């Protein structure tokens, strides 16, 4: 797509993000059937604020968080300038929606999604802006058809924006959600992109709208298929053990977590993505031929779906 000069409309981005938070929360509440989101509005001392919404102890979802934030300041956080050192000395404005869903049933995957917009400005110079985001799936007891559905939905979302977009952003997701110290992916991937501005503002905004709105199309059919699958203590304990990988990634590698903490964001909201219960086990090895081993041998390396 051509890089056309277009007016940056920050208010259009904010309107979309707020509506996305509303629509995803409503859909997750409907799917759960019992629990509802509690909203916690907050202000950031250095500028901006947000709305954190958390659903807890539902029938389907043990915990789900859907956060909106809009923060700004006169100095770029270190996590941002490390990625883009040419932006040091600029003021910044960042807004986004980020969500994580931790289901009760170990046969329902955990999932994460976010879409975000960033702009850095300096008097006398053109603003530098970009979009980023994506979604990924973290199953504990993966089902092939679920993974295929997830990726085919992602592919359909990307198709209007270019023939190579899905493969590029799928590969980016595989690289990003990877734990080098474990030599495994966090799950079965999905889409991830950052620094998106070469398409121009309008097309880039259309893409994050498609990704944000498409998350429910990708995720809810899997939830509906697996939420009533029987499970026992063995499956629950494995789910809690594998949730530890989520914690490891978010605290060690995730750029969004680092940006939030370094920019003075609200700690409770930043760490909302953490699972409510988790465990570690020294030297865990799945039994040969078990369903748990299948996760490691067939699903924690990048695959074409």
Image (tube, helix red, strand yellow):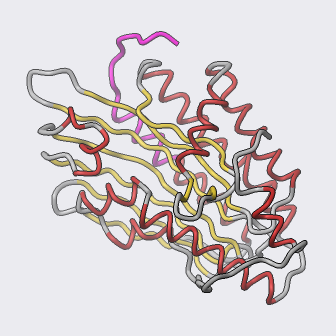
The residue located at (90%, 79%) in the rendering is 230
Instruction: Name the quadrant containing residue 251.
Output: bottom left
Q: Is residue 109 left or right of residue 4?
A: right
Instruction: Name the quadrant containing residue 122.
Output: top left
The residue located at (57%, 62%) in the rendering is 100
Residue 273 included in the magenta stretch of the image:
no
Query: At which x and y percent is residue 169?
Result: 59, 35
Query: At which x and y percent is residue 283?
Result: 64, 82
Instruction: Name the quadrant containing residue 225.
Output: bottom right
Give the magenta-colored segment's residue range.
1-19
Query: At which x and y percent is residue 247?
Result: 51, 71
Query: At which x and y percent is residue 113?
Result: 57, 52
The residue located at (76%, 74%) in the rendering is 106
In depth, the one of 201 and 295 nearer the eye is: 295
Q: How many marks?
A: 0
Query: In the rendered view, would you say 71 is above or below 140?
Result: above
Quadrant holding the C terminus? top right
Q: Is residue 216 left or right of residue 227?
A: left
Extreme residue toward the left, this view: 124
Query: In the rendered view, would you say 291 is above or below 232?
Result: above
Query: In the rendered view, would you say 150 is above or below 277?
Result: above
């Amino acid at each position: 797509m051509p890089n056309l000069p277009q007016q940056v409309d920050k208010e259009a981005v904010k309107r979309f993000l707020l509506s996305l938070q509303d629509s995803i929360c409503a859909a997750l509440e409907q799917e759960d059937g019992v629990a509802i989101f509690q909203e916690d509005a907050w202000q950031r001392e250095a500028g901006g604020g947000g709305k954190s919404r958390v659903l807890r102890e539902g029938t389907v979802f043990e915990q789900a968080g859907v956060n909106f934030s809009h923060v700004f300041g006169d100095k770029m956080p270190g996590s941002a300038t490390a990625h883009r050192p040419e932006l040091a000395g600029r003021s910044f404005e960042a807004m986004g929606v980020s969500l994580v869903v931790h289901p009760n049933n170990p046969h329902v995957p955990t999932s994460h999604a976010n879409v975000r917009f960033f702009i850095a400005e300096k008097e006398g110079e053109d603003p530098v802006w970009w979009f980023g985001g994506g979604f990924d799936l973290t199953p504990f007891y993966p089902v092939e058809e679920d993974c295929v559905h997830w990726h085919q939905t992602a592919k359909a979302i990307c198709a209007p924006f270019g023939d190579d977009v899905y493969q590029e952003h799928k590969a980016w997701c595989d690289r990003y959600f990877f734990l080098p110290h474990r030599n495994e992916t966090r799950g079965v991937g999905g889409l991830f992109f950052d620094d998106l501005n070469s398409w121009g503002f309008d097309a880039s905004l259309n893409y994050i709208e498609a990704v944000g709105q498409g998350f429910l199309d990708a995720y809810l059919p899997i939830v509906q298929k697996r939420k009533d699958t029987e499970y026992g203590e063995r499956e629950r304990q494995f789910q809690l053990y594998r949730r530890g990988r989520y914690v490891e990634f978010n605290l060690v590698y995730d750029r969004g977590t680092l940006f939030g903490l370094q920019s003075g964001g609200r700690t409770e909201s930043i760490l909302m993505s953490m699972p409510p219960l988790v465990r570690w086990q020294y030297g865990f090895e799945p039994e040969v031929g078990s369903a748990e081993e299948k996760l490691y041998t067939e699903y924690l390396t990048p695959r074409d779906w």
